[in-house]
Amino acid sequence: MNLLNIFKRLPSLSPAEVREYIKRKQPGEYCLVDVRTPAEFEQSHLPGALLIPLSNLGMRMEQLNDDKPLILYCRSGNRSRLAARLLLAAGFKNVFNMDGGLLNYKS
């Protein structure tokens, strides 16, 4: 684990950029990761998103493929920002946080 990655600038995408990215790419070319709770995920989520609650991320990192861009989101962007930093610290390189989370995606 490279702890210096925690202090690097976090790569982020705006909700508009995520929307455009999803339009341009095939589903298998990227991975949307929802880091909210299962109850939040049941209420709403982005199509094709993989649910990995932030509390389980450490135990489930092996399910993620760093060969594909990982776009993380939550409700407001705070949990996904932390999750992105954890993945970067663990050595993942192709990680993006969706700024503002689903609150901004829907507006």
Image: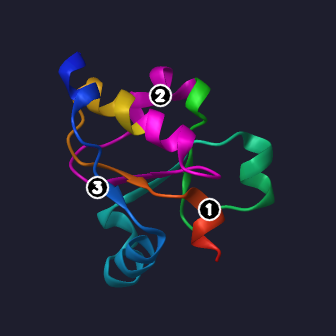
Horizontal side, residue 1 vs residue 51: left or right: left
> The disc labelled 1 sits on which kind of residue?
Leu
Quick check: can you spot residue 46?
A: no
The residue tagged with tag 2: helix, strand or loop? helix
Which residue is at the front of the view, 79 or 41? 79
**Earlier-in-chain disc, 2 versus 3:** 2
The residue tagged with tag 3: helix, strand or loop? loop
Foreground mark, 1 or 2? Answer: 1
- According to the picture, the residue beneath numbered tag 2 turns out to be 60
Q: What stretch is highlighted in magenta?
A: 56-83
The residue tagged with tag 1: helix, strand or loop? helix
What residue appears at the point 62 percent right and 62 percent down from the top-left corner? 102
> In which quadrant is the N terminus drawn?
top left
Position of 71 relative to 86 (above/below)? below
- According to the picture, the residue beneath numbered tag 3 turns out to be 69
> The disc labelled 3 sits on which kind of residue?
Pro
Horizontal side, residue 8 vs residue 19: left or right: left
**Earlier-in-chain disc, 3 versus 1:** 3
- Structural distance between the alpha carbons of marks 2 and 3: 17 Å
What residue appears at the point 24 percent right and 17 percent down from the top-left corner? 3
- Structural distance between the alpha carbons of marks 3 and 1: 19 Å
* Mark 3 neighbour class, 10 Å CA radius: few under 14, some 14 to 19, many 20 or more: some
Position of 9 relative to 42 (above/below)? above
Determine which quarter of the picture holds residue 20.
bottom left
What residue appears at the point 64 percent right and 77 percent down from the top-left corner? 107
* Mark 1 neighbour class, 10 Å CA radius: few under 14, some 14 to 19, many 20 or more: some
Horizontal side, residue 19 vs residue 42: left or right: left
- According to the picture, the residue beneath numbered tag 1 turns out to be 102
